[in-house]
Image (cartoon, helix red, strand yellow):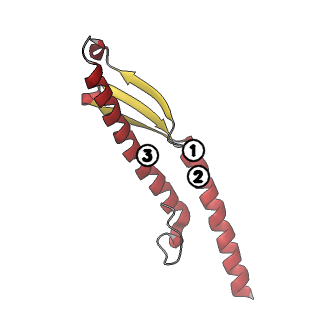
Amino acid sequence: MKDLNSLMKQAQAMQQKLADAQGRIAEMEVEGTSGGGMVKLVLKGTGELARVDLDESLMAPGEGEVVADLIVAAHADAKRKLDEKQAEVMREAAGPFAGMPGMPKLF
């Protein structure tokens, strides 16, 4: 029974670490850029768009399509960075259980 109790304690500890990791993820922010920094946007850890900054030179008439493309590219950059950070935090939280056969893929 000692082994079962030990296993249960380890599982509870891992569950707490994963919950803590999810909290850290929710608080993080990442910045994505495109157009050499002419477009910057910030995504929260939840994936919510928090801010968009546009270089004033993009406000010229006829630049709408370019601006739209740059915003999409900046979002893709930020999303990639967010996914990487989220995976890193979850791997750290899962510790030795990360990638263990039979464990659900969390990240």
Cβ–Cβ under 8 Å for marks 2 and 1: yes
Using a 10 Å C-alpha cutoff, classify the residue at mark 3 as few (fewer than 14 neighbours), some (14 to 19) or many (20 or more). many
Residue 16 vertical placement versus 23 (above, below): below
Query: Looking at this view, is 79 or 11 the one in front?
Result: 79
Residue 6 vertical placement versus 86 (above, below): below
Which mark is on residue 83?
none
Gap in Å between the C-alphas at discs 3 and 2?
Answer: 13 Å
* Residue shown at the point (63%, 56%) measured from the top left: 19
Query: Looking at this view, is 22 or 13 the one in front?
Result: 22
- Asked which quadrant contains residue 72, the reply is top left
Say whether residue 94 is left or right of residue 65.
right
Using a 10 Å C-alpha cutoff, classify the residue at mark 2 as few (fewer than 14 neighbours), some (14 to 19) or many (20 or more). some
Tag 1 residue: 26
**Element under disc 2:** helix
Name the quadrant of the N terminus.
bottom right
Q: As shown in the figure, which amino acid type bears the numbered disc 1? A: Ala
Tag 2 residue: 22
Tag 3 residue: 82
